[in-house]
Image (cartoon, rainbow, N blue to C red):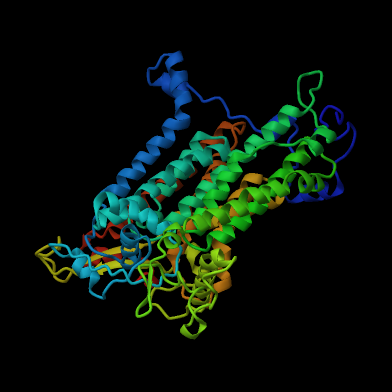
Amino acid sequence: DTATHAQPGRAAGQHPPAWQRRLRRFGYAGRPRSDVRERLVPPYPEPGTRLWEALGAAPPAAARIARWTGWGGPLLVALFAGLLRFWRLDSPHKVIFDETYYAKDAWALLQLGYEGTWPKNANAKIMADPQQIPLSDAAGYVVHPPVGKWVIAVGEQLFGLTPFGWRFMVALLGTASVLMLCRIGRRLFRSTFLGCLAGALLAVDGLHYVMSRTALLDIVVMFFVLAAFGCLLVDRDQARARLAAALPLAPDGTARPDAEVAARLKLGARPWRIAAGVMLGLATGTKWNGLYVLAAFGVMTVLWDIGARRTAGARRPFLSVLRRDTPWAFLSTVPVALVTYLATWWGWFANSGSYSPRTGWTHSGYFRHWAETPTSQGGGGYSDHGPLAWLNPLRSLWHYEHEVYKFHVGLNDPHIYQSNPWSWIIQSRPVSYFYESPSPGEAGCPKDATEKCAREVLALGTPLLWWAACFAVAYLLFRWALRRDWRAGAILCGLAAGYLPWFLYQERTIFNFYAVVFVPFLCLAVAMMVGAIVGPPGARENRRVVGTVAAGVLVLLIFWNFIYFFPLYTGQTLPMDQWRARIWLDTWI
């Protein structure tokens, strides 16, 4: 019996190591006994046709429909998300919250190539009829890189400096991120259903929804981080497929581990990892917290390579990866991300402006000529002639970045909506982006109302989704630590990279909406937990029925919760008693 059930890569009759036997007491399952090719690249299950045949489709047509669900399902979920996000996108028809910075900076990039300055009454003039745009070409001091503002600027180029214009691209990226998450979940879980469920949960998360309808930068960071994660997943599958194809075959046609192949095989070009480097460079070029994700994903992809070579039979997989894969992994991500980041400053570099002894440098970005400015005037004092003069723009940018860094780490001005990252996971302190109290008979407030109504845009994650995610994260920790489930580890890596770095800055003024960067990974966690609740395909029928009902109830409650809070996400006018009924916690006010 021992010989029959020997694990791949272990001789018949050889018992598992003692540490594995001890961990089994706590639920450790060990490696599955299967073809090494299937362990390296698990196949997608054949899509079922029973549903489509029950609906009247002939078997050949049902088979075609089932095959199309791999893209058809995600596209339908994305269509649903898009309809939600673009519905009355210009409401409230005002400049809300930090749109006052990024919408105007985006317009300045379009007009000047760098961020200009605006008077204090600029918002009123922009929203006036006829519109006035009081943009000055004097350089403005900004504390975030330009990528997110260039993204917002695309919508303004298409639709003008209007609420719809500056929200258009964030709504588009929010919709596209739902499509991406469906496909990422499908690849991660090898299940179209669980992938579409993860995307649907993202579509009805209140924080992601509000951020997809507000011209802020964090949704742009989220999009590029998720895109990088998806690129690395594709790269993982392709690299493992190359390993699997190179392994020798046993007489029964199954692949067997081979230490020589696993240790020495070159995996060739890996364009998806380069694409991930570009995405992470764009994320960092939007906000600097992308740097933490770059570091975490770099470690993750190297660990994936170690696991692949170990599964293929390498005796010393760490050394094999160190020699064969790690240098290329570094070059494919870090330098690529750095070059991408520098390229995003092209507008700042290109607009060198002009110099006048009376006014100094004009028509150029902030600190653009710091390096050539005399030290007596607060500059770097470098010569604008000589063999190293070409480095002056980079020196100026370095100084600018250093000043911005000092600003960020020293930002501790109190704000009414600031929150500690400990509270984010339970959404105890959301941020109100917009609030007004219409009088009876105004702005949709009933004429017979006994008091003023409330109209608010509250950046609140769907509470039941986030609270369920707390249990899902605990489940994933179990799966990762005791079941060696790489999928759980990958999701936890994305969550940790977007969340844990903020604990280093608990004294800084930070806000709950920064959590939107890791919302997709919370949705993946909940989808994975739902799959476990439903039960494995081989489970007893009663177990599957009970699990399906429990999972269905949970998902329906999350959808109901989103519908219930929908008026708070979209700025609809509510009678005061209905508004109070939706304020479940005192800290939400």
Q: How many marks?
A: 0
x, y percent for residue 545: 51, 36
x, y percent for residue 468: 49, 54
- Residue lying at the far right in this picture: please name it: 13
Q: Is residue 282 above or below residue 114?
A: above
Residue in the foreground of this view, choosing between 15 and 287: 287
In this image, 238 relative to 419: left or right?
right
x, y percent for residue 178: 43, 45
- Residue lying at the far bottom in this picture: please name it: 376
Residue in the foreground of this view, choosing between 81 and 581: 81
- Residue lying at the far front in this picture: please name it: 386
**At 43% across and 74% down in the image, what residue appears?**
418
Q: Is residue 287 above or below residue 228?
A: below
What quarter of the picture does the C terminus occupy?
A: bottom left
Residue 427 is at least partly visible in this image: no
Q: Is residue 58 above or below residue 583?
A: above
**At 31% across and 55% down in the image, what residue appears?**
167
What quarter of the picture does the N terminus occupy?
A: top right
**At 64% across and 52% down in the image, what residue appears?**
298
x, y percent for residue 331: 66, 50
In this image, 586 relative to 373: left or right?
left
**At 67% across and 32% down in the image, what residue appears?**
241
Residue 105 is at least partly visible in this image: yes
